[in-house]
Image: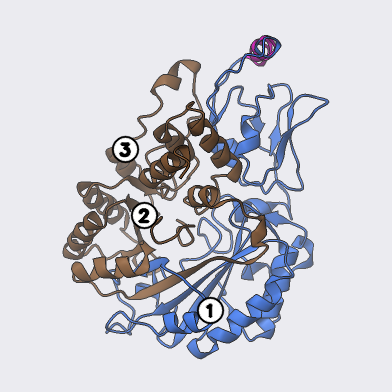
Chain colours: A blue, B brown
Amino acid sequence: MRIDPRKCVACGNCVAVCPMGAIAIDPVSHRAVVDEDECVECYTCYRGMSREHLNPAVVRAIRRIARLVRFRFDPEPDVCPTSAFTETELHWPRTVRRAFSDPIVPHESTGVAGRGTEEVKTNDVTGRVRRGEAGFTVEFGRPGIGARFRDIDRVTRALAAAGAHFEQANPVTSLMSDPAAGRIRDDILGEKVLSAIVELKTRMDRVPEILRALRAIAGEVETVICLGVSARCDAGGDTELAEVLRAEGFTFWRGKTNLGLGRPLWGDAA
Amino acid sequence: MTNTLHRYGSPESLRDDYIVFAISTKANAEGCVPKLRAFLEIAQKHGPVSLGNAKKGGFHRPSPHLTPLVHWRRDGGLTAAEVIAGVDAPTVVCAVFEDLDRVRAFLAELRERDLGLSVNISGLTEEARRAAAAAGLVRHSVEFSLGFCLGQTDRMPDRRTLELATMCGHGMVSFGLVEKLVLLVKEGRRTPAEAGRCLARFCSCGVFNLARAERLLEAARAGR
């Protein structure tokens, strides 16, 4: 993403809007500039801000006068008054930034817009997580921190060593040079994304091992990790997963509940 | 794809936050568009806070062609009919509710209509389970959110900022914008409703709960 210096009036609205804090007003040029290394190409600035098409010279003149008399005006905080954002053509490996950060862009490996797969949202039809199994979603970078693939690689290698099998139809798995070892290809390790979701499945009795492996490695990464763990319920809507998680010291109250209304139902429906 | 699993807040803070969404998959994608629209039409009868389309957004969306003259009338947003009409391809559609009674009534009608789409509730799991049971449904699968629990959690901001920002699960609502709007509300330069709508415009799939946002912003204004 780029900000056209001929159009930017340094209003500063985009500074607060950027989820990665990658935009600042340059004190010399008096224009907003994007720190390309921190920018994850999420397009929040370009698409999320409404756009006016005012004349930059007029806006700058008005702003200079207002500043001169210490007048605090009250602009809309989500508007770029001169439509100064400009898309830049992305090339590999920078393209992975947008694929993982802009939710509108379908990921090439899954065809699904966003960072993950359907997880258990369609489990009633796909049977992806079956009775006696648990599915994990390990998300890096959210909220508001971002993650480099070198950190994700550290964790996926630790998970592979703990016996994890990664979901094949997942964007991160598609970027592994060696999925069995959890190794992510070298040429993207420095790339930063807004978030990335690693998905894996395991037997229910191995859930504690996976959680302990995650806890052990989490201290070595420079980002935040959030976890989701899923299970197929029995005929009464119960699952032993909740007890397993509590026994590992986790407290939780929120989640996704699949109501089993999808058709055709997967074969194990009670 | 919507992204609603991890929303920050205590059970009390999340008491008015339920997202019911419908999704097709490869096995039932053919002919799903009328069903997705039907889902939203049924939802609309039960008074949601918002309806959303993962590919196009919810009621409140950014405009690429604003002029200074429209600032005073940009608060209306799209109508439910416009959001529903905008569903023209397989996608994920959602309805956001602040009231569990409405969710129960919605689920009961969904069960009756039997659209064949996978339907999930994102929210407090035990409340969701009870709402499903009241509608005659047994949960098929569940995914528990263990939250933002590992790694450098000390880099995250304060509770109020997290509660508001994580209502866009794709991370499009920045901490900086939340902090700015909380300040504008405290200064009396924006109402909680205006600030909430501003945040909602950044949510690209319509899952941002404007009713909860207003409540949280009002609490921030009052220093609670």
Residue A12's disc number = none
The alpha-carbon separation of the residues under discs 3 and 1 comes to 46 Å
Residue range corresponding to the magenta coloring: A55-65
> Residue A38's x, y, as percent?
73, 48
Mark 3 or 1: the one toward you: 1
* Circle 1 residues within 10 Å: few <14, some 14–19, many ≥20: few
Q: Provide the residue designation for mark 1.
A: A249
Host chain of mark 1: A
Q: Badge 3 sits on which subunit?
A: B
Residue beneath disc 3 = B82
Q: Are marks 3 and 1 in contact (CB under 8 Å)?
A: no
The subunit letter for the residue under badge 2 reads: B
Question: Badge 3: few (under 14), some or many (20 or more) residues near its Cα, within 10 Å?
Answer: few
Q: Farthest residue toward the right?
A: A28
Q: Residue at x 67, y 67 (%)?
A: A175
Amino acid residing under circle 2: Asp
Label 2 crowd bin: few (<14), some (14–19), many (20+), radius 10 Å:
many
